[in-house]
Image: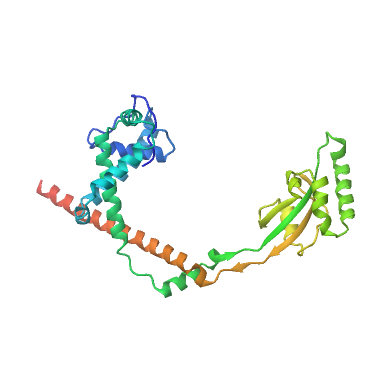
Amino acid sequence: MTMLADTSPERADPPHDRPPEHRYHLLRAALAAGLSGLDGLEGARLASIARQADKSFDLESLVLGSIEAAEVIIPPGRLDDAVSEVQGRYPDRESFNADLAGNGLDESTLHHALHRELIFDAVMRRVAARRPAVSELDERLFFELHKDRFTQPERRTARHILITINEEFADNRRAVARARIERLADSLGGRAKRFPSLARKHSECPSALDDGRLGTLCRGQLYRTLDAALFDLQEGAVSRPLESELGFHLLWCEKVHRERSAAFSKVRARIRQTLEERAGRNCQKAWIAQLRRADGRRSGSVAAVG
């Protein structure tokens, strides 16, 4: 559970036909929406939070009414740990209780809400564990169909020298700035080993402090002109003067890292985990749908009798 937020006694009132534990779901929905608590909630925002709380509370109640839930026993120590985890985020017990009260809760209600949550989680884990076993064929098929996930694209390790354009300064007026970058290009004369020292001395980018280092980049991380030039350079080559929104540049392609695909054996464990999690979620969805159909039939029978 997320740490409860300080609120004043003025708060949104829960629906009268809901048990006290519903309040916990209201608070959880508010925190998930980025709010600090339930204080001051009204109108459309309160209605939206209430809908989310109703959905999660009703799902929890449906699961807790199942045969599987009746078989789950939560050890008292586990519940105590859950409560202590929440309480431990407060400086003292008084702050903890005041915050509960400010959000329309008390310690007894929190115990019940957390107990429900622990049973719900335990049941959903059990249902997910019913998933069919993942075979090597499943793993290899996933690998072949999603090879892009396991491919590292081509990258370039680069440095640059920047001369900015600023018409307010004589040395950075456009024509002067271009002449300066061209002199630096001539000074390099294709001798890339001099690039770090020239970047440190002349570049007007903060990267000058690191000898002009830009790091190892994938396509699309630089301005379009620079990006296209960098990925057109051979390893060890220096670009001609280039212009971007910042000014004029020289680029050095220090190293080319070719596209590399991972071997199946290296990613097999990750694929298996992905497939097992997906299969577990599908089991949960199917089981919940079955519960809802059964609940609908029961409701219909009761209505017919009535």
Task: Please tell me whether residue 290 is drawn above or below residue 41 in the rendered image.
Answer: below
Image quarter where the C terminus lies is: top left
* Colour theme: rainbow
Which residue is more in the foreground, 154 or 159?
Answer: 159
Would residue 58 be seen by someone viewing this image from the given angle?
no
Task: Please tell me whether residue 133 is drawn above or below residue 184 in the rendered image.
Answer: below
Image quarter where the N terminus lies is: top left
Q: x and y percent of residue 160 in the render?
A: 77, 52
Please give left or right for residue 262 compared with residue 253 in the image.
Answer: left
Report the residue that reaches farthest toward the left: 305
| Residue drawn at x 83%, y 55% as measured from the top left | 194
Would residue 284 be seen by someone viewing this image from the given angle?
yes
Please give left or right for residue 215 compared with residue 144 in the image.
Answer: right
Report the residue that reaches farthest toward the top: 9
| Residue drawn at x 82%, y 51% as measured from the top left | 197
Task: Please tell me whether residue 275 is drawn above or below residue 124 in the rendered image.
Answer: below
Q: Which quadrant of the view contains residue 188? A: bottom right
Q: x and y percent of residue 131 in the render?
A: 32, 65
Which residue is more in the foreground, 111 or 13?
Answer: 111
Please give left or right for residue 91 compared with residue 297 in the image.
Answer: right
Q: x and y percent of residue 252 in the render?
A: 77, 57
| Residue drawn at x 69%, y 54% as measured from the top left | 215
Q: How many marks?
A: 0
Q: x and y percent of residue 14 in the render?
A: 28, 33
